[in-house]
Image: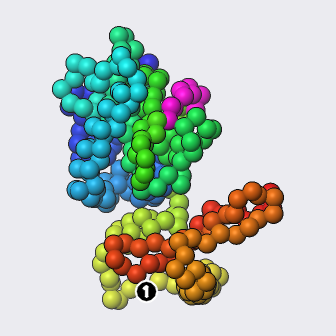
Amino acid sequence: MNSRVVDNPPAPGTPEWRAMVSGSKIATILGLSRFQSQYGLWHEMAGLIEPEAFPENLGAWGHIAENSLAEWWKLKHPGWQLNQKTSTAEIAYTRDDLDFPNIATLDRRARRGRAFHIIECKTARDLADWGRPGEQDAVPADYYAQVLWQQGISGIHQASIVVLGPFGEPEIHEILWDEQVFEGMVERARAWMRSFKTGTPPPLDDSVRTYEVVRGLHPDINLDEEVTVDRDDAIAMLDAITTLDQAEADARAAKIRMAQVMGTAKKATVDVPGLAKPVKIADRRAKGQGTPWVQFNKKANLANA
């Protein structure tokens, strides 16, 4: 393994950066990302569309939060120092022995003597996708893939994710190094990079981002052009649209019924045989002085214990 620090890493969005497999991209390449589609990323890396713009305020808040979360990790790990002998907070690594452009940017790198530790900092509006620290699969799969990539590219096999939810103090999740999983990620990344030479994008999916990309690839309307669609495909697509309309109406009716049942209550629960506590199926929320709305708990399990 030949890991080295990148003194002047390319800025996100630049052509050089687009061509690299990074920690933020590997989860999408693996089909694990909650925020990006494979189809969208492929076209961004191919230079066919512009990357999605990152909200400026969100980015600024993220960098501010990184400082506090890294200091929290340091508080919980006496004797460690943050980013010794470096000029910037984030540190980027690459591996010259891999046959495709690669990079891994660490939010923070802690040091104690000759030992290093990766610190990845996250904020979350809620922790519904997270388990408790120490539990199996407690970290969302896309974040796990990101940090494992950082470990494999940097050669630093000790890592933590520090996450701040909407309430309480930050949680620290340790990420265990798994060389076999990382090697599988490398093979997937290698195949992904080969797909650009053949011009073979990933298949279409049902994500919002893929729909945006397909629309963006064809911005013009040729008034003299028409296409013939297979009849069975047309029936399937029309059925999907009409089914969606009915599903949206049914969902709206469910919210209306629940709002009527709840009245002024904060939450609605269901008694499930075999469970000691009722299961929450919905709650009422409001922004400021706005009118409350009903939020259903889609993960509620009402099966008997």
Residue marked by disc 1: 226
Q: In this view, does 223 lie above or below 11?
A: below
As shown in the figure, which amino acid type bears the numbered disc 1? Glu
What segment carries the magenta color?
Answer: 173-181
Q: Where does residue 239 sit, x and y in percent of width and height?
A: 62, 85
Closer-to-camera residue (167/230): 167
Q: Where does residue 18 sit, x and y in percent of width and height?
A: 31, 46
Q: Which residue lies furthest to the front in this view?
A: 264
Drawn side of residue 291 relative to residue 67, left or right? right
In which quadrant of the rendered view does residue 230 lie? bottom right
Q: Can residue 141 be seen in this view?
A: no
Q: Which residue is drawn at 50% across and 31% down?
A: 174
Closer-to-camera residue (236/250): 250
Q: Where does residue 123 sit, x and y in percent of width and height?
A: 38, 48
Q: Is residue 122 visible?
A: yes
Drawn side of residue 121 relative to residue 143, left or right? left
For the N terminus, the image quarter is top left
For the C terminus, the image quarter is bottom right
Closer-to-camera residue (221/71): 71
Secondary element under disc 1, as helix, strand or loop, is loop
Closer-to-camera residue (212/170): 170
Q: Which residue is drawn at 26% across and 27% down?
A: 6
Q: In this view, does 108 lie above or below 279?
A: above
In which quadrant of the rendered view does residue 238 lie? bottom right
Q: Where does residue 226 sit, x and y in percent of width and height?
A: 43, 86
Q: Residue at x 29, y 30 (%)?
A: 91
